[in-house]
Structure formats: C-alpha cells, structure tokens
Image (tube, coloured by chain):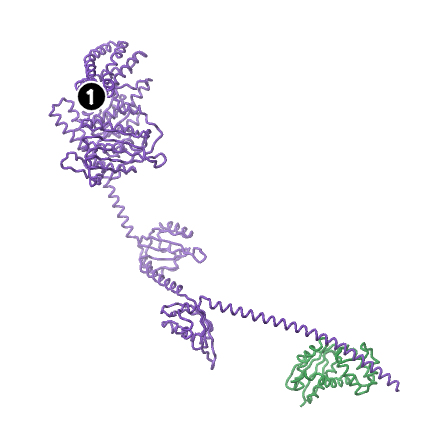
C-alpha cells in the first residue's frame, strides 16, 4: 500500500483526534515500519488494517465508517497531490470510467511495485454506473469513501448502493445513481 | 503529564526522522534509477539516430538504384499529369521514339499514340475510370519522330481524383516495352494461320483429327466434300466404323501403332463414302502431341487418289501389253535370226565346199564374191542382232576364268595371217605382268578385239597394226584395270569424224573408198559392250597417220598362272582325228552335207540323225566322242534331245554335246547350257571355226584316253598343218640353194619310204617300222615339219619300250593319213622357191 495512504491517514487522525491517538494506535500495533511512514514509500496493507482497527478500539467508531470517512478525506489529498493527472476530467462518472484505464496506468508508471485494486466500470445509462471492486485487501468501504469524495469534488449528488459479490468482501458491486 | 508529552514528542520526532531517512533513501534510489534511465535513454537516442542515418543512406542508395534502373531500362518508363503531359520520361523513351527529352517534355502521351489507335486508347482509359480499374495493360502502336510505327505493350497505373462522387483522371505512370517484333510475329502467325486454314479448306486435301481411340474430333470441309458427310455427322464418331472397309482395318491398326510411337507415315486405303461408294485415298498421318509431349491423337490428310489408282491399273495393263509385245519382238528376232542364218549357213558352207571341187580361176572369182557377200551379210545380221540385244539389255556379262593372254595371242595370229598378203605387220605387245588367268567374259572380250582389229585391218594398207595390253591401276581388291590398245598406221580421220565413230550407223565415209562397208554398228557395239562391263573406250586419230583405239576394262586377276605350254598346245596344234566318232544331229540336208564333207575331209568318222528323236536313239547304240546337235529339229528339238541323253544312263551320258544354232541370242546360249550342252557353235560357221570346236572338245577326250592309257608322254601326238618357217630360217637362213637341195631330196626320197612303211605295216613288222620311223625322222625335221618328227619319234620309242599298242597303231594311222597333206605342203613350199 502506498505511503501516501498511511501519511494521509495519520494526518487525518492527528487532525481529528490529536497526535496522542496517533501515538496510541501506532504503539498498539505491531508495525514492521515502526509507524514511520513516508508518502513515497510502500508498506504492507496489514499495517493499515491494524492502525484502523486500533483507531476503532480507541474511538469506538465503527470500522466501515472509519474507512468511508478516510476514503473521502483521501480523495481530497490525492487530488491535491496528483490533480494534474485528472486534468480534462470534468465529472465524477468520467473519473470513475478513467480509474482503471487511465489513473491506475499512470500510477503504475510512477510506482511499478504498487498493488492496486481492480475496478470493472461500466456505464449503465446516463445516470447509472456500475463498478465492481476486486481486491485481496477487502477495503470496499474505503472505495465508497473515495467515490463519495469524488462526487463531492465535482459537486455532484448520487446514491451508492453496495452489493457484496462474495462473503469475504473481496468483490463488491456498486451502483452509482445520480440524484440530480 | 509533561514527561508524557516529552516522550510522545520524542517518539514523534523519532518517527519523523525515520520517515525522513526512509524518504531520503527512496529518493536516492529513485535518483539513481533516473540517472540510469537517462543514460539508457541517451544510448537509445544515439542508436536511433544511427539507425535513421543508415536508413536514410539506404534509402538514398535504393533511390539511386531505382533511378539508374529506370534510366538504363530498355523499356520506356514515363509519367503523365492530369493533362496527359509527359512529366517524366526515361532515356529509353528518347531512344525508342527518336525524340529528345526536351521534345518529349512538350508532348502529351496521346500525341505519341498513332492516329489509328487514339480512340481505342482513350476509350480504354475511360473504361478504367468507370470501372475503377487502376492498373492495366495495353498494346498500341506509337508514332516515332520519323513517322515509323513502333508497337508498345505497357503496364500502367492510373491515378484518380474523386470529385462529386465520380472519378476523374489525375495522371498515369507506365512502363512500355517495344513489342514490334512480337506483334509482327503474331501478325505473321495469324496471317499464316489464316493462309493455311484457307489452303486446307480450299485444297482437295481432307483434314481430319482423331483421338487415340479413333474418335473424330475435327474435320475440314474438304473431307466432307470428299465423303459426302456433314461435319456434324462425323464429329464424335469412330473414324474406322464410319469410313473403313473391313479389308483395310489391319492396315489402319498398323498405322495406329506407328502413330502411338509418334511416327509419321503415309498409306493408301479405300474409304466408304456416305452414298456407299468406295474411294481410294492416300492418307498421310501424323501424331498430335500435347504440351507434355504425349500423343493425344492423330491428324490425317486424305488425298483422293481414285484417278491415280485408275491410271495405275491402266499402266499395269499397258505394261503387260508392252511386255508381251517385247516378248513377241524377242521371239521375232530369234526366229528371224534363225530364218536368215540357216540359208546363209548353207550358202557359206557350200561356197567353202566348192573351193574343193577344182574350180576354174573364173569360178574361184565368183566363189570369192559369193563368199565375201555372204560373209558380209552374216556380219551385218550379227551386228544388227547384237545391237538389238544390247538395246534390249539382253546382253549378260558372264564372268568366268579365262586366259586373256591366250585370247590376245590367238587373235593376233589370226590377223597376222590375214594381213600377211598386204604386207602389214601385226605386232603384239603384252605386259609381262599379265601372267594369270582373269575373270571376265571371254566371248565379249574376243568380240571387242575382233571388231577393233578388223576395223584396223580394213583401213590399214601399209605399216603396222599394234595390239598391246597393259596392266594398269588397282581398282579394288584383286580387280585391276587392263588397258588394251589397237594402233594402226592406216588412213586415220579428222576430229569431226573421230567424234562420231561410236555413234550408231555413222561411218568414216569416203566416197572413193570401198572400205567403208559394213553396218556402221561395229564400234557402237564395242563401246556398249565395254561400258556394260564398267570400262571406257577412246581413240586418238590423225588423218593419214593412223588411229589408236584404247579401252580399259576392270578385270579380276586370279592366282592361277597361265600355263604357256597348254596354251600353245591348245592353239597351235591340230590333233589327229583318227578313231574319232562324231554324231551329227541335223535336219537340214544342206547343212548336213556341209558338215559331213568337212568331217570326211579331216578323216573323222560320223553317224547322223535327221531329228532329235533319232539322235537319242542312235546315242544309245554306241559311244561317240562328240555330238553336234542342231537346235531346231522336228520331233525332239536339240535341247530336249540333250536333256534326254544326259538324264538316261547310256554310253553318251557324259559325251560333249555342241549346239549348232542359227540364233545369236544370248538366251539361246543360256538355254543350251541349262539343257546340259557343253558349247555352242553359231551357224554359219567356217571350217576353221568347226575345227577349233572339234579341237577343243576332242582334245579333252583324247587327253582323257591318254590318261587311261597311262601314257602321258604322248602329248606331242601331233600333225603339221603348215611348214614351220622359223625353224627353216634357223636351218637355212638365206642359203636358198641348200634349202632347195634338202627339199628336192625329201620329195624324191620320202615317197618310196612311205610305200615301204605301208608294206611293213601290212606285214605287222613292228620293230622294222620303228627303225624306219627313226630313219625318216630327220627328213621331216629338215623341211619344217617338227611335229611329224616328234610323232615318228614317239612311234619309234613306243615300239622300242613296249612293243605295239593301240596307241602306237593310232599314231601310225595319223602319220599315214596326214602324210599326203604334208607332202603337198612341202611341194608347195618347194615350188615357191
């Protein structure tokens, strides 16, 4: 998992809960990196899972909410860091359609070792879009947060319905329906 | 709380520091990675630049190569723009079209196309535009600068421009080749094809093509006309079934086999026309090959030869008629020959006999005239008949061994005697290299010599006649040219006459001379006879100086040496004919009288028969030494009688039989030999000719008898029929007086001795006879009668060694019988002194 996800996550935790919580969740986790992250590095996703899990224990906020909120937050950070990559994309659906064929291709160029989730995106009609998420890391909720962050970025409103395609959470289908 | 915060901060700082170090490490790694990537990129760039340079150079080269190719091509390469203006032409275009580059650049493509083809070319391009065909091939005539036409075959690429949905012309690139030769060859081929097709269709030759199975695949009109069928009635049918009569099927099958072998041949068959009539055709057939060289069928050219066949039949009939008439002609000649010669024989024969009847001088003169005229008539007929034989190609060259030297000597002697009275010397000059028997035709050789010598003799009054023979070059193994020449010092002739002498009926005519008598055929016959044997004849002649005839004959030399003694004996001696018994079979009373008179004169016993049947009967009664057999006799003719005598066991089964024939035809001679006869004597004959014949056969008989008697020494059992002048010369030389004395003594003394001899014989006092013979011997020798001397010596020694024998009795008989004749010779010689 890319370092930026960790640095942004810890930034957000510090922002919302203060560095003590950051220190707490790092200390309680068994982290090979010892909790020292840099945005350009790459770290095991198990570290993220432990950090989110310990935040959940620390804050009592449900895991899915934590992932979703972090997803929304992460979209803004990524836009800030790599916005130039999205130039020319003017709406959320275009962004979704571009993920697999455009954005991930660019990411792979920068970080050949990046392990990225797979998205199968298809436009059902003008207002409906289907996305199937597949990833060993089972972070469908993080994806929901990112979708929401994206919709918010383009100031669009849409409902997101979520269907687990497998019980282990590795494959999830989202139907995104514009509401306005 | 504060220490807790400090610890928290410391952990935070520691994490931050670690994060920074990690980030620095990553950045360092990335920077290195970037550096390397940059280096690689630089290398890639250089590599690419090099590649581009190389490619550019290659492209330049290739461009140059193509340019050179185009410029040096034999084909015209050109490009025209939308207005057909020539924007590019290669040098070949200038070369072929004879225009300069400048001139061509000012022309349009269509201007170069010959007027007759402009429309065609335009229409073709329009068609291509309509059908959107961008590539094509076109042949057209173009006009050179000098007005000549060149045929071009061009591959072209059209360029189109689309406007308003339709294509318009936008230029053309083309490569054109000079196909004038091909075009003219094609044109010629086409013309030829057309020509031959016309010929085939218009000639009376029926063309037909069939498969290997004989199925008709193509017929031409002429064949339809010939057979009466239409083309449709024939195509697909079996040629054999439709046309061929059964009896010609085997001919056709043989031809089919040949055709399968790829052979060409011609043959004649009949074919059946549609109306059932038959037609003779000559078919010339040849195989048809496919591209692999396999025979796929055959083509037959049928030529109507019905007329030819009819003419052939007529010719065959005409030939038969001609042959029949030729046969008749031959028969006629043979008969005429007989009819003329028989009476002539009698005339000549009787004339000879009349000389023996003590005629008066006047009568002798008349007899001479009769004899000469008859001889002339005889020669005339012989010549005419000979020429007829030659012209009818009935003369056959008989190749047998003969003694050429003997023949030359014999003929030399004959003419020596003949010319003696005139004082013309006859000289014989023989090449000593000719010393073996040769193979050739003795009779014809003899005839040639006779003709040439009689000719020389006729025209030569003074000087000499020289007969010479030379061995010349070798022609083949054992075959040599023998050159014989007859030179005379006679009247000669000029060039003009010399050129004519070998022509028939041309004579060296001299109105003041009586010598030019004869048929004028003699030399023509000689020439024919020589050429018939592969020889040549020529002559040199100078008027008033003489003439030389020379001829060459190829003759095979045998390895048998000429026996000089035998030759001498054969020619010069005359046997004693006592105890000889001859049978004459002759139906003509005059001829019989002639023959019997001569035989009686020579002391030869004879019996006679008037016809063949009688001859056969008599031949059974006793043995004869010789049978003279006339051919044309009643009951059995001479041939039949001979066959009868030869085939039945009897005393004369092996007796020599000589045919007496009036026919000079070679065929008659062949017949005689086939019937088993030993020789032929052509009537009329002179006493000498008869004597020679008798000598020839009786000689053999007597020799045989001698062998039986085991007394070979007695070969010189001879009589003298003339005085040996050379021995007289040896004895007396010019001493005429001595000679006179010797002869006188002989004449006075010999008669009493003969009388005494006869008495002793009656008293059979053999030893006294031997003594007397011994005593008389030298007297005979001295008067040139050497043979009689030898005869007496033989009698003397015979009695001395073995007492009296039949042989000696015969010799005594010969001596006494011939004495009167010899006595006369001596008296004549004495009277001439």
Looking at the figure, which quarter contains the N terminus of chain B?
A: bottom right
What chain does badge 1 belong to? B
In the image, residue B648 lies at what x, y percent? 30, 26
- Is residue B278 visible from the viewing direction of this image? no
**Residue bearing the label numbered 1:** B601
On screen, B319 above or below B778? Answer: below
**In terms of depth relative to the viewer, which is nearer, B204 or B405?**
B405
Q: State which chain is coloured purple.
A: B
Q: What residue occupies the far front of the structure in this picture?
A: B734
Pick the front one: B272 or B501: B501
- The quadrant in which residue B795 appears is top left
Q: Quadrant of the C terminus of chain B?
A: top left
Does residue B572 sit above or below B230 in this rendering?
A: above
**Figure check: B699 above or below A80:** above
Residue B56 horizontal side relative to residue A104, left or right:
left
Q: In the rendered image, which quarter is residue B775 located in?
A: top left
- SS at mark 1? helix
Q: Nearer the viewer, residue B447 or B210?
A: B447
Q: Position of residue B413 (x, y in %)?
A: 24, 27
Q: Quadrant of residue B655?
A: top left
Identity of the residue furthest to the left in this view: B362
Answer with left or right where residue A161 lies relative to residue A29.
Answer: left
Chain ID, green in image: A
């Amino acid at each position: 998992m890319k370092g930026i996800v960790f640095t942004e996550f810890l930034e957000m935790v510090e922002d919302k809960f203060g560095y003590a919580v950051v220190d707490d969740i790092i200390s309680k986790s068994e982290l090979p990196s010892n909790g020292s992250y840099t945005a350009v590095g790459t770290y095991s996703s198990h570290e993220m899972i432990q950090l989110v899990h310990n935040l959940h224990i620390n804050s009592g906020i449900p895991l899915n909410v934590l992932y979703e909120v972090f997803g929304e937050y992460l979209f803004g950070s990524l836009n800030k860091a790599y916005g130039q990559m999205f130039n020319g994309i003017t709406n959320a659906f275009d962004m979704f359609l571009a993920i697999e064929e455009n954005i991930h291709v660019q990411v792979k160029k920068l970080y050949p070792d990046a392990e990225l989730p797979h998205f199968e995106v298809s436009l059902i009609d003008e207002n409906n879009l289907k996305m199937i998420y597949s990833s060993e890391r089972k972070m469908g909720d993080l994806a929901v947060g990112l979708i929401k962050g994206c919709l918010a970025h383009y100031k669009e409103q849409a409902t997101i319905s979520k269907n687990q395609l497998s019980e282990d959470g590795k494959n999830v289908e989202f139907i995104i329906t514009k509401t306005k | 709380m504060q220490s807790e915060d400090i610890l928290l901060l410391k952990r935070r700082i520691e994490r931050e520091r670690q994060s920074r170090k990690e980030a620095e490490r990553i950045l360092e790694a990335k920077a290195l990675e970037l550096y390397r990537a940059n280096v690689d990129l630089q290398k890639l760039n250089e590599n690419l630049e090099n590649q581009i340079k190389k490619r550019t150079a290659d492209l330049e080269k290739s461009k140059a190569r193509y340019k050179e190719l185009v410029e040096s091509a034999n084909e015209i390469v050109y490009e025209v723009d939308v207005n057909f203006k020539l924007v590019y032409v290669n040098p070949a275009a200038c070369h072929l079209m004879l225009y300069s580059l400048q001139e061509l650049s000012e022309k349009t493509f269509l201007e170069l196309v010959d007027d007759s083809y402009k429309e065609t070319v335009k229409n073709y391009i329009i068609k291509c535009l309509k059908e959107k065909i961008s590539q094509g091939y076109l042949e057209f005539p173009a006009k050179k600068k000098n007005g000549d036409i060149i045929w071009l075959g061009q591959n072209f690429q059209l360029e189109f421009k689309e406007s308003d949905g339709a294509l318009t012309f936008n230029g053309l690139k083309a490569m054109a080749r000079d196909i004038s030769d091909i075009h003219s060859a094609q044109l010629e081929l086409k013309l030829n094809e057309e020509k031959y097709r016309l010929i085939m269709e218009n000639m009376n030759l029926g063309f037909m093509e069939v498969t290997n199975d004989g199925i008709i695949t193509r017929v031409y009109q002429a064949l339809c006309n010939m057979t009466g069928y239409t083309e449709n009635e024939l195509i697909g049918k079996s040629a054999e079934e439709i046309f061929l009569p059964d009896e010609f099927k085997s001919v056709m099958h043989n031809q089919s086999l040949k055709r399968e072998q790829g052979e060409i041949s011609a043959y004649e068959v009949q074919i059946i026309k549609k109306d059932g009539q038959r037609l003779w055709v000559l078919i010339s057939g040849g195989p048809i090959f496919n591209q692999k060289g396999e025979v796929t069928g055959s083509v037959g050219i049928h030529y109507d030869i019905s007329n030819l066949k009819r003419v052939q039949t007529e010719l065959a009939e005409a030939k038969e008629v001609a042959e029949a008439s030729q046969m008749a002609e031959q028969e006629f000649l043979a008969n005429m020959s007989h009819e003329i010669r028989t009476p002539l024989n009698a005339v000549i024969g009787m004339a000879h006999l009349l000389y023996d009847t003590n005629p008066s001088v006047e009568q002798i003169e008349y007899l001479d005239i009769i004899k000469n005229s008859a001889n002339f008539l005889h020669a005339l007929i012989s010549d005419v008949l000979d020429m007829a034989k030659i012209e009818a190609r009935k003369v056959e060259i008989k190749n047998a061994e003969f003694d050429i030297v003997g023949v030359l000597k014999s003929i030399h002697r004959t003419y020596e005697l003949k010319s003696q009275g005139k004082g013309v010397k006859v000289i014989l000059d023989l090449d000593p290299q000719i010393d073996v028997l040769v193979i050739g035709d003795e009779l014809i050789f003899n005839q040639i010599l006779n003709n040439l010598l009689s000719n020389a003799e006729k025209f030569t009054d003074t000087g000499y006649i020289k007969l010479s023979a030379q061995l010349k070059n070798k022609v083949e193994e054992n075959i040599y040219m023998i050159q014989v020449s007859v030179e005379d010092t006679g009247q000669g002739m000029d060039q003009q006459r010399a050129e004519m002498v070998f022509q028939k009926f041309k004579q060296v005519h001299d109105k003041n001379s009586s010598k030019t008598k004869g048929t004028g055929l003699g030399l023509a016959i000689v020439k024919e006879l020589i050429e018939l044997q592969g020889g040549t004849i020529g002559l040199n002649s100078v008027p008033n100086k003489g003439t030389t005839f020379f001829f060459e004959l190829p003759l095979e030399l045998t390895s048998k040496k000429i026996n000089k003694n035998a030759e001498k004996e054969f020619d010069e001696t005359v046997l004693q004919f006592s105890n000889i018994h001859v049978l004459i079979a002759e139906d003509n009373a005059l001829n019989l009288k002639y023959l019997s008179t001569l035989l009686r004169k020579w002391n030869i016993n004879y019996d006679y028969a008037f016809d063949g049947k009688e001859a056969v009967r008599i031949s059974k009664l006793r043995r004869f030494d010789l049978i003279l057999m006339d051919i044309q006799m009643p009951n059995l003719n001479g041939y039949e009688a001979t066959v009868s005598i030869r085939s039945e066991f009897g005393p004369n089964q092996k007796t020599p039989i000589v045919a007496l024939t009036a026919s000079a035809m070679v065929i008659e001679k062949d017949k005689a030999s086939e019937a088993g006869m030993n020789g032929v004597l052509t009537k009329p004959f002179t006493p000498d000719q008869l004597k020679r014949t008798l000598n020839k056969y009786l000689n053999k008989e007597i020799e045989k008898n001698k062998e039986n008697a085991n007394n070979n020494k007695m070969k010189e059992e001879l009589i003298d029929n003339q005085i040996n002048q050379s021995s007289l010369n040896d004895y007396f030389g010019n001493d005429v007086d001595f000679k006179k004395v010797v002869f006188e003594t002989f004449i006075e003394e010999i008669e009493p001795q003969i009388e005494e001899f006869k008495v002793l014989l009656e008293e059979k006092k053999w030893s006294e006879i031997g003594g007397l013979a011994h005593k008389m011997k030298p007297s005979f020798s001295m008067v040139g009668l050497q043979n009689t001397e030898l005869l007496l010596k033989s009698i003397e020694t015979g009695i001395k060694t073995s007492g009296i024998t039949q042989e000696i009795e015969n010799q005594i008989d010969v001596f006494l019988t011939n004495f009167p004749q010899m006595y006369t010779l001596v008296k004549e010689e004495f009277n001439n002194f």
